[in-house]
Amino acid sequence: MSNHYPDRRFVIFNTSELSTIDFNQVFETSADTVRKSLDELKTFVKFDLPSPSSITALTTKSQEYDYDEMLVILATPEWTDPNPQP
């Protein structure tokens, strides 16, 4: 586990639930500024423990990931285009 952010967690969920996120509880600023998967069906937010209420209420959320685990996920073809356009 990363020592950079010991209490930081990330949760992936369907973009259809973005409107339920209280952006005062997470580090992202709005639904317009979150990173989305390449197919735009998933997104994620980051927060410090304990999990905020708007996160625990999500119905499509993944498990909680730490910083290092999330970096690995974001490097996959689901999140990063393996053939970016020049």
Image: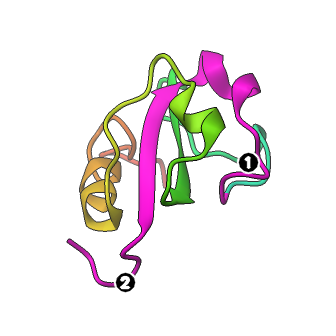
Query: Quick one: label 1 or label 2, which is nearer the N terminus?
Result: 2
Which structural element holds mark 1?
loop
Magenta segment includes 26: yes
Q: Is residue 66 left or right of residue 30?
A: left
The amino acid on which the numbered mark 1 sits, given as a three-letter code, is Thr
Image height check: is 17 above or below 34?
above
Q: Which residue is mark 2?
A: 4
In this view, the residue farthest toward the bottom is 4
Q: Residue drawn at (33%, 34%), measured in percent from left and top?
A: 78
Kind of element beneath mark 2:
loop
Q: Are marks 1 and 2 in contact (CB under 8 Å)?
A: no
Taking the image as shown, residue 17 lies to the left or right of residue 67, namely right
Q: Quadrant of the N terminus?
A: bottom left
Residue at coordinates 59% horizontally, 23% vertically from top-left? Answer: 15
Please report the bounds of the magenta region as a residue range. 1-27
Packing grade of label 2 (10 A; few <14, some 14-19, many >=20) is few
Residue under numbered circle 1? 33
Q: Give percent across and percent down for residue 28.
A: 69, 54
